[in-house]
Amino acid sequence: MTDIVSPFPDLDDQFVRALPELTLAWEPQTVPAPAMLALNQKLAEELGLDPDALQSPEGVAFLSGAATPAGANPVAMGYAGHQFGNYSPRLGDGRAALLGELTDTAGNRVDLQLKGSGRTLFSRGGDGKASVGPMLREFLFAEAMHALGIPTTRALAVVTTGEPVMRQSPEPGAVLTRTAASHLRVGSFEYAVRMEDKSVLVRLADLAIDRHYPALADSEEPYLGLLEAVRDAQAELVSSWMLIGFIHGVLNTDNVLISGETIDYGPCAFMDRFDQATVFSSIDHAGRYAFGNQPSITLWNLTRLAETLIPLIDEDADAAVEKVNNVLDGYGAKFMASWHSGMRSKLGLASATEGDEALFDQLLGLLQTNRVDFTSAFRALAAWLRDSPEPLDLLFADADVAERDTWLDAWTAALDAAGSSADRATVADGMDLVNPIYIARNHLVDEALRAAESGDTEPFHELLDVLLQPFTKRAGLERFAQPAPDDFNRSFQTFCGT
């Protein structure tokens, strides 16, 4: 007789025990007809969960929020946030519930959270629910980013609820199960500091160190070290976004994780034709979170974190301010070092050489002036090294070819100066390992989600399969490597549905 495997993970409640002041109790809410829509089997196995058990009626009930493991202590997490620069002192999980933490097969502590699981005491009048399209969108983007090697929250499952969600029109309801190294945010610190109880802030900072930067625990200035560690993690994260043309879209302080993972895939998008001012978010009217603004906005968000840590860093406020300013002053160098290192990899440069920065800037200028597709450009450059100039010629069909060729001469000279292999095909192969051919292009995502909302998930699963192998060119997938038509992107907008 086969043993019955429980779908319920063994959950801890470390966050609740450490910081009850930042939580509100959450009760499971039944839904009419929960059904599995998408399950991340590989992630389930990494978490030590049985995929078959998760697809059982009990597993689906668990993933819908209708049932929780015995002993679990699910809560809505409290946090504040600066949203588009405006401070909101009490946000919190309005439609999410932290089920608890589990230990994955690699020994890492991981948060398990439901999203779209109903009202909480932070809901502020909302229904606390979510619909199929936005939840599948988060699943798609999270797993695409993970496949690209970018730190991110992950999607374990999307379950339909069998009930409509009222937005502009009725939409099919859904619940997403999300994992994260933790859900500690800059906004968590903004919420803790406003309580005017230093012990809460201390416990939060200590938990962040324990979860993400344990080596700091025995340092002389652990809280200053925490700020520096988060600075470095965010500098590297944002540079990784920029290197693949990703636009977060809603980079508020409540969407900045202390761990350095990407979170919240609502108004996000990948850029097709390169333009520093690219914005797709329907609510970012001033372009605050445009592609090219992401590094400076991240420093702004880190400054908000630094302000909360001042009471912990030095009893002398002036001395504390001087220390945090020194840390913040180092952000630009950290970001640029990560950006330049990434650009060298994208262009096959084995080492740094004089003139690299100018070479990078000139390339981006060419791409912007000639409205060239960002992702395709680097694959075309690799093809050019293999003596296949056609892809590059197509991208620059309406360009000043002389200016382009001048840059190509400078690039090949830089390859020689950097000591890159004399075998240009080998250099091109290395470039293809870091430059994706497939990204979550806006028109393909839109097409897949519209089909899923109408009950056809085949396009979603097809696109997901493509995005899970972003660097490997495969026959028959040519359309997945093509940018959206110009008229599509001119009118396309993203929304905060997730």
Image (cartoon, rainbow, N blue to C red):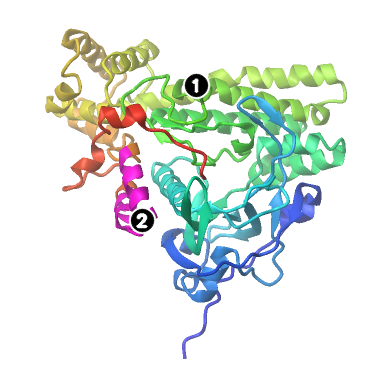
Task: Give residue 334's mark.
Answer: none
Task: Using the image as rendered, state which of residue 18 and residue 82 is in the foreground.
Answer: 82
Give residue 74's position: percent from left, percent from top.
69, 60
In this view of the protein, which residue sits in the foreground, 322 or 417?
Answer: 322
Q: Can residue 423 be seen in this view?
A: no
Of tags 2 and 1, the one toward the viewer is: 2
For the point 62% across and 70% down, the residue is 67
Q: Is residue 452 magenta?
A: yes
| Quarter-of-image position of residue 89 | top right
Image quarter of residue 399: top left
Local packing at callout 2 (Cα closer than 10 Å; few below 14, some 14-19, many 20+) is few
> Based on the displayed image, in which of its 4 quarters is residue 7 positioned?
bottom right
Mark 2 residue type: Ser
The correct choice, above or below, for 181 with respect to 487 in the image is below
**Can you identify the residue that label 2 sits on?**
454
- What amino acid does circle 1 point to? Gly
Residue 411: x and y in percent read 26, 16
Disc 1 residue crowd, few under 14, some 14–19, many 20+, Cα 10 Å? some
- Judging by the rendered image, the residue that carries numbered circle 1 is 287
Q: Which of 289/471 is in front? A: 289
Where is 294 relative to 493, above or below?
above
The x and y percentages for residue 56 are: 48, 75
Task: Give the dominant element type of the magenta stretch: helix, strand or loop.
Answer: helix
Please determine whether, in this image, residue 91 is positioned above or below residue 45. above
Q: What stretch is highlighted in magenta?
A: 443-465
Which element type, helix, strand or loop, lies under badge 1?
loop
